[in-house]
Image: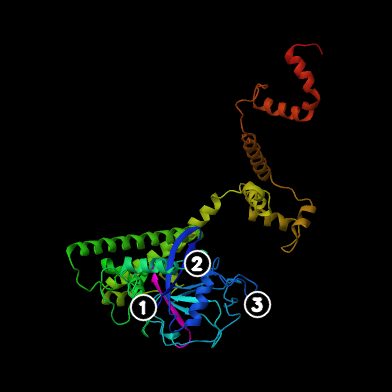
Amino acid sequence: MAPKKTRVYLDVQVGNKDGGRMVFELFTDVTPRAAENFRGLCTGEFGQGQRTRKPLHFKGCKFFRVIRGFMCQSGDFVSDNGSGGESIYGGEFQDESKIRRHTQAGVLSMANNGPNSNGSQFFITFKAAKQLDGRHVVFGQLVDGIETLRLIEKIPVDAKDVPRVPIIIKDSGELSEETVEKFEGFVGVSSSSSAEGVVEGPSMQQGQAQKGGRGLLDMGEDESDDEEEDGANAGVGAAKEPFKNAREQKLFELRMKLNQGRRENNKEVIEEKRRERDPAYEKKAAQRAMEEARKRREEQEDPEEEAARKAVQIPEGQGYLQDSAMAISAQLDKEAKKEKRKGDFGWNVFNQDSLYRAHKKRISGLEVDKREYEKQKESLGGGADAPTTAISAHGFQPSEEAKDRLASEMEKQIAKKSTFSRRRMAVEDEDVSYINKRNEHFNKKLDRAFGDHTREIRQNLERGTKL
């Protein structure tokens, strides 16, 4: 009589979406205590913990650590960060046989803080992890739900490997013996309890025998992003075996197309999430595209041309050495014209700089005759070192020509001011109570001063009633 197989399941929820179910077969023959601990935590039949006073149940736990290409970790039903947990035996329990190895994806193993520190935390490998052999107790293997495991692997994480999208165990339990028998009859699986820990799964429906210790999860392992370029061969773990007939081959090809479409859809979903979270995503994508295009150009470039280009290349930050004097002068003139055209705005209209520029503009037509000035300075006897105030205080008389020039300039400024008028917004629906623009402006002043006091009088006049 074949030994009874213990199989448990974890129903996973990713965000607010159903992530699927993962079914594990527990190695009760080699690691009975670890297997029973995991089974009891899946069913929740042991009630509350002796130390934590928390329900001994995986339901509601999160996968708090996901390292792509390595493993995902869960089982901390106390704090969901890897610092808590408790076994069904109360606290921690001793290590068991470590003869089984982390040889493939889907290996179920105990997480610990050193020897004999097993609690409720566990991890599932995404691929072979030989560095963990002899350090962690392997007590189970994934036999169904490889697509769910790959979905967990592709969830984006932060700098501390914490998933950005919550991955929650929404339910867990043990499969009944009848369910296990139906499961095996449907997929035609046969498990082995050898030291290699090879377990065949439902995805091996082609009937090929597994070789070299590779199992169900190795097929899903090929579906990772590192193998996307394999095209139709992606996701195949046992595709080297011949097909029995053309129908099986056609079915296999259709499955490969479905897998390829699923991977492309997942990539688009991840790209969309990144685009929503990162406002600068488009800019970064454009920079990556430019960098890739530059690398392609460098690969296609002739080595001799590349050497010649690098020989004459200007060091970074010294590009100005290639600019000619005429080009620099033209650039400075262009910047000066642009600065001149730029008008003042808002609070900059009456600052010191704008007032000085306005003063210089007003006196631009009043040029000083230096020779006439020096001649008058000598005639007054002040000498070359006499201050200007001393000269003006000792009977300085400007020439008639200078007076005419000043009067002419003042007349120009007055004429220019008379043509200036600030544009005011015109409201089409407003009542017309004026005969010209000046009268309109005056009426608005009257209304601001006396409008509230004369409103009733104006209304009576408009209605024609007595005052």
Query: Gap in Å between the C-alphas at discs 2 and 1?
Result: 26 Å
Q: Is residue 144 magenta?
A: yes
- Kindly tell me whether residue 74 is visible in this rendering: no
Mark 2 falls on what kind of element? strand
Mark 3 falls on what kind of element? loop
Q: Amino acid at mark 3?
A: Arg
Residue occupied by mark 2: 172
Front label number (2 vs 1): 1
Q: Which residues are magenta?
A: 134-145
Q: Is residue 260 magenta?
A: no
Q: Is residue 42 above or below residue 405?
A: below
**Quadrant housing the N terminus:** bottom left
Q: Is residue 441 above or below residue 387?
A: above
Query: Gap in Å between the C-alphas at discs 3 and 2?
Result: 22 Å
Residue occupied by mark 3: 51
Residue at point 49%, 87% (across, down): 96
- Kindly tell me whether residue 459 is visible in this rendering: yes
